[in-house]
């Protein structure tokens, strides 16, 4: 057990199993007191209570909280649970989500869209909204959001891509808003084996991509055998330490032992006309060869 996070209090949403559980246990092993969370008890594969029990059995402190953080009021109660039990909140890891739909745009229903956006993006906002006043008052805080490589627009499932891209935008904006209060906000896109990406629906989809020539055999086999969730935890713990106090507004990619940093978008090229508006004829000539 380490002591880098001694006396810190952390909430990890979606920590009943998979990546969230691995992060919660790793934070506890560095001395943090942890509030675990998932929607409801009895989830196959583990829930907030089983994760909390594992932390306690290892000699650390934890309590479970059941509730859907896509609900604004439930998210507030989760934050308050940390305050009531441990007296403060230092770390928030927004990791909760729902299984990927893997549904093409023209097949998505409004309900599908709302469920995905609420679970990933709204849930992240809800918890962040209720946590930031506490961190602002304490003059210290760490918020870490879970995004995905899908934020780059990887098909299918544009609802998931939109939610994860929105999470990146939320991360950048949050980082700027809280940076003067001793708090940071970063995001990570993990490649790890979870129930979201190892179910039969995902495997069937990957096989379809491979047979269509979209995935190479090497990439197909890599995606069928992702790294363990434990490979994600070390970077997340590091980002929560005092040593990482100047790192904020960043988006990391974690793929096993390979860590990468995404660059922020920049204007790749520009055309400018000093007088009058562009004409369509001018743009027809200039955009392909000068802007693109």
Image: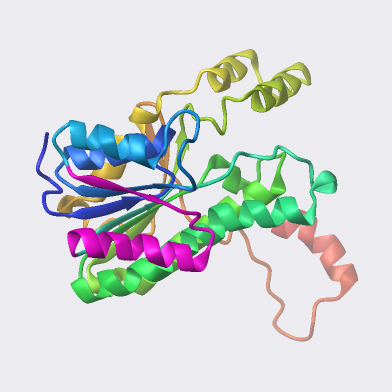
Q: Residue at x 62, y 56 (%)?
A: 117
Image quarter of residue 132: bottom left
Q: Residue placed farthest to the right in the image?
A: 281
Please name the residue shown 56% across and 51% down the image. 164
Examine the rendering and report whether any part of residue 21 can be seen.
yes
Position of the N terminus, as image quadrant, is top left
Residue depicted at 72% across the width and 58% down the height: 290
* Percent x, y of residue 187: 41, 51
Residue 141 visible somewhere in the drawing? no
Q: Residue furthest front?
A: 42
| Residue in the image at 25% along x and 48% along y | 34
- Position of 33 compared to 280: left or right? left
Which quadrant: the C terminus? Answer: bottom right
Q: Nearer the viewer, residue 237 or 16?
A: 16
Percent position of residue 173, x then y: 45, 68
In the figure, residue 196 lies in which quadrant? top right
**What are the residue bounds of the magenta stretch?**
61-87
Depth order, front residue of 279/71: 71
Direction from residue 111 to residue 217 in the image, left or right: left
Quick check: 128 above or below 57? below
* Occupied quadrant, residue 286: bottom right
Residue sitting nearer the eye, 119 or 247: 119
In this picture, residue 188 sits left or right of residue 4: right
């Amino acid at each position: 057990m380490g002591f880098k996070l001694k006396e810190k209090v952390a909430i990890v949403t979606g920590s009943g199993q998979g990546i969230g559980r691995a992060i919660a246990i790793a934070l506890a092993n560095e001395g943090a007191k942890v509030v675990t969370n998932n929607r409801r008890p009895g989830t196959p594969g583990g829930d907030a209570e089983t994760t909390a029990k594992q932390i306690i059995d290892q000699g650390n402190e934890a309590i479970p909280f059941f509730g859907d953080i896509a609900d604004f009021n439930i998210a507030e109660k989760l934050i308050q649970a940390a305050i009531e039990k441990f007296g403060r909140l230092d770390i928030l890891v927004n990791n909760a989500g729902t299984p990927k739909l893997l549904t093409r745009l023209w097949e998505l229903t409004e309900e599908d869209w709302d469920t995905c956006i609420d679970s990933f993006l709204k849930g992240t906002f809800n918890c962040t909204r209720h946590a930031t006043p506490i961190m602002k008052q304490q003059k210290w805080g760490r918020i870490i959001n879970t995004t995905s490589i899908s934020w780059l627009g990887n098909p299918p499932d544009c609802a998931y891509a939109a939610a994860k891209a929105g999470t990146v935008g939320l991360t950048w904006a949050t980082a700027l808003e809280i940076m003067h209060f001793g708090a940071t906000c970063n995001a990570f896109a993990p490649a790890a084996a979870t129930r979201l990406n190892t179910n039969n629906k995902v495997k069937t989809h990957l096989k379809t991509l491979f047979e269509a020539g979209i995935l190479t055999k090497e990439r197909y086999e890599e995606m069928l055998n992702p790294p363990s969730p434990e490979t994600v935890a070390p970077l997340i713990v590091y980002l929560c330490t005092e040593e990482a106090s100047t790192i904020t507004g960043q988006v990391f990619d974690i793929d096993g032992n390979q860590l990468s940093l995404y660059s922020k978008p920049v204007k790749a090229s520009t055309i400018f006309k000093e007088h009058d508006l562009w004409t369509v004829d001018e743009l027809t000539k200039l955009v392909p060869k000068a802007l693109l």
